[in-house]
Amino acid sequence: MDEKKSLYINGKKVLIEGEKNLLEIIRKAGVDLPTFCYHSELSIYGACRLCLVDVEGRGIMAACSTEPQEGMKIKTTTDEIRQIRKISLELLLANHAHNCPTCSKSSFCKLQEVARKHGVEEVRFKKIQKSSALDYSTYSLVRDPNKCILCGDCVRACNEIQGIGAIDFAFRGSDATVLPAFGKDLSMVECVDCGQCARVCPTAAITPKSEISEVWKAISDPTKTVIAQVAPAVRVALGEVYGYASGEDTTGQIVSALRIIGFDKVFDTAYSADLTIVEEATEFLERKTKGEKLPIFTSCCPAWVKFAEQYYPDLLPNLSSCRSPQQMFGSVAKEILSKEIKKDKKDIVIVSIMPCTAKKFEAKREEFIKEGIAEVDHVLTTQELARMIDQAGIVFKQLETESLDMPLGFKTGAGLIFGNSGGVTEAALRYLYEKVSGEKLEQFEFQEVRGNESIREATINIAGNDVKVAIVHGLANARKVADKVKKGLCDYDFIEVMSCPNGCIGGAGQPVTFDVKTKKDRTRGLYEADKKLQLHKSQENHFVTDLYRSTLEEPGSHLAHEMLHTNYSARRRVSDTEIQILNGSAKEKLEISVCVGTSCYLRGSQDLLYKMIDHIESNNLQDRVDVKATFCFEQCDRGPSVSIGGKVIEGCTLKKACDEMQNALKK
Amino acid sequence: MMTDTQTMSRSRQFSKVCEILERYSYDSTKLIPILQAVQEEYRYLPEEVLTFVATSLNLSPARVYGVATFYSHFALQAKGKYLIRVCDGTACHVKGSVSLIEVIQEKLGLDEKKRTTPDMLFTLETVSCLGACGLAPVVVINDEIHGQMTKEKTNALIDEIISMEKSYVPRNN
């Protein structure tokens, strides 16, 4: 029999139970080592040098990158270690912007906390870095390089969790800095606004962008009716800020707080999540019957949608055309309320409270702004709501609970579990089961789609038909599944994708936490909230049924499509990236661009480009044309794409290109 | 106005980049030799070409940018036709390299920040030791090494290049 291995931490015997590094085992033993660059979800980096321990016979080493071994004798605090940590902290603070009282991360900042705990009371070193400009370019995030401590957490989160790499280290030594490609603004590169970088950042080098002042302004404007919609994941996390246990449902307190703040109505995004299920499941059934555009991918996660637009343009037809619950809510609420309270849509201000930073981007997508009127005007994260509650002087813990407004505050448990990874799938199954079988679903929980693993699959039999589902969280995993779909290596019917680990409850807008257990508690909180409700299936939401009766007619109707659906288009990853090939000297030149992006390249666009240049040169046309190699005309499935004088030719051949050139040059 | 040689070279350069990528079998672990080869071709690493290289190798452009900015060998800005490198290592410094730098800066209207002339003819860089200390002070123009330089000799050398460039008339067709 295997004897259990153990080691000694500060003289106490501790069993080694599969921990991969000393840090985990020391924390298990109840000693909190400080870290900046260690996250159990990310690879080990060993850069911050704070988790130092003294291993007898081996000296001082970083606990995060040392493997536990039988019989090790470890001291977690010695004079030497404390001194080294203090100097490391002082050095980090030397170059850090010292505006803590006005910093949005103040009191949640890990650097602040660790420095305080270690008694750093003065910084003896001089600042050497010049200050850099802040990046406000995206709707979702603010980058402040002056607060970066180069722990690399954001870089690894973007690479490892999301598989994107929109930011990375650039330059060297004392010039080293974390930047988007070419030092561009974040909005100009492939960032999908998920904010996982901000979630793991120990300081305020990347933070969610605040819309608090805009919301206060709307609230104090007497001509505006200000409506709140609260996303499921918010209610099981906001309480953390005020001493409630994570996962505790604080919907009632949130409603009271929002009313005190000055919102005219408080509704629930879980209502429109129910509506989403009715539309999305109907869409799925239609596709399944016709056997087309399968598997269907969910589309409620805006970061995933942007990711798919950038990396999987050929899978876009597979994405559900349903808008996300946030956008469905905005569209429906403005329509209904403008009639009900006889107010112009522009004077109804919809504010979403979301666990998510990408929702800020989604609300500003041009598809969702019609004639200058946005369906959703402002998006606040859970963190921002907490700040508004504080600004209003509300003592959250003392609030009486209040109920949501009707009808758009009514939801079933199906809408509520949207905030968990697997929730959308489960809600859809609850609908599909009854719709397809015609039988009542008694046991409404589908345990087989729940769980923590980042890629899960299940086969559910509904009235003799197997429905194969896959559930993914983290875009790096979504990439794996999408690649399998593209190669035809799987036969899923339904794929749920959430960008953030464990779904929306792990969103970047949620209260800052570095405790992995928090996410589990929030997940459990939503499943429990579902249990406590009377209704658990979206089709039982009679206010949704009413909406169809009064306005939308039936699921998938023409009007439903107009109000609740959207479409997607391929998107460039990095802006301003054309390679000049020929630059003619004539005053009026014919603009020619040949796509050399991945899809077009595979379809032979490079070869086509050379042949076109040969043709241009042998006909002596080089002065009259401008030729560029470019990325993406957003028609990747029909490449190679060539644009001649603004006209895009799909499936271009040399002959087609030459004919079009001749035509255009004649003019 | 673009000359034929230049337009020709642009399309040739792009096909060369594709050739380089193919030569390294689109292997992302060969990023550094690929960037070196691309820089040989363009004499620097243009942004759009780096993006193309990144996309072709399945790397994020930010990662490729990170590598390109880490090594001082890689240049992200276009350099002049003549790259003047003045050695400012210990030996050259003692032998008066600073005065050579000043002469060149004054003559070409350059300074610490402005390193390339607007006509893209000259770029001035300082390097720390070329290992030719016996010839100090050393000025290298493109790949040609000029040892035991004086202010006068440096001046003359640049004049010579300027007059040679003036008499050069690009052939048309």
Image (cartoon, rainbow, N blue to C red):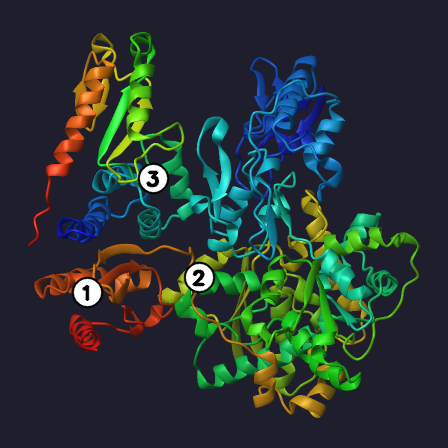
Quadrant assignment, res A572: bottom left
- Looking at the image, residue A264 sits to the left or right of residue A79; the answer is right
- Looking at the image, residue A484 sits to the left or right of residue A629; the answer is right
| Secondary structure under the numbered disc 2 in the rendered image | helix
Q: Mark 3 lies on which chain?
A: B
Q: What residue type is labelled 1?
A: Arg
| Secondary structure under the numbered disc 3 in the rendered image | loop
Q: Which quadrant is home to the N terminus of chain A?
A: top right
Q: Where is residue B112 in the image (x, y as percent from the top left)?
A: 39, 27
Residue that carries the numbered disc 2 in the rendered image: A310
Which residue is found at the position 74% from the left and 56% from the top?
A213
Q: Where is residue A315 in the image (x, y as percent from the top left)?
A: 42, 69
Which mark identifies residue A624? 1
Q: Residues within 10 Å of mark 2 (few under 14, many from 20)?
A: many
Vertical arrangement, residue A571 with respect to residue A553, above or below:
above
Which of these two is toward me, A434 or A473? A473
Report the mark closest to the observer, 2 or 3.
3
Quadrant assignment, res B79: top left
Q: What residue type is labelled 3?
A: Gln
Q: Are marks 1 and 2 on the same chain?
A: yes
Which residue is found at the position 62% from the left and 27% from the top?
A92
- Cα–Cα gap, marks 1 and 3: 28 Å
Report the mark closest to the observer, 1 or 3.
1
Q: Which chain carries label 1?
A: A
Which mark identifies residue B77? 3
| Secondary structure under the numbered disc 1 in the rendered image | helix
Q: Which amino acid does label 2 sit on?
A: Gln
Q: Are marks 1 and 3 on the same chain?
A: no
Q: CB of mark 1 within 8 Å of CB of mark 3?
A: no
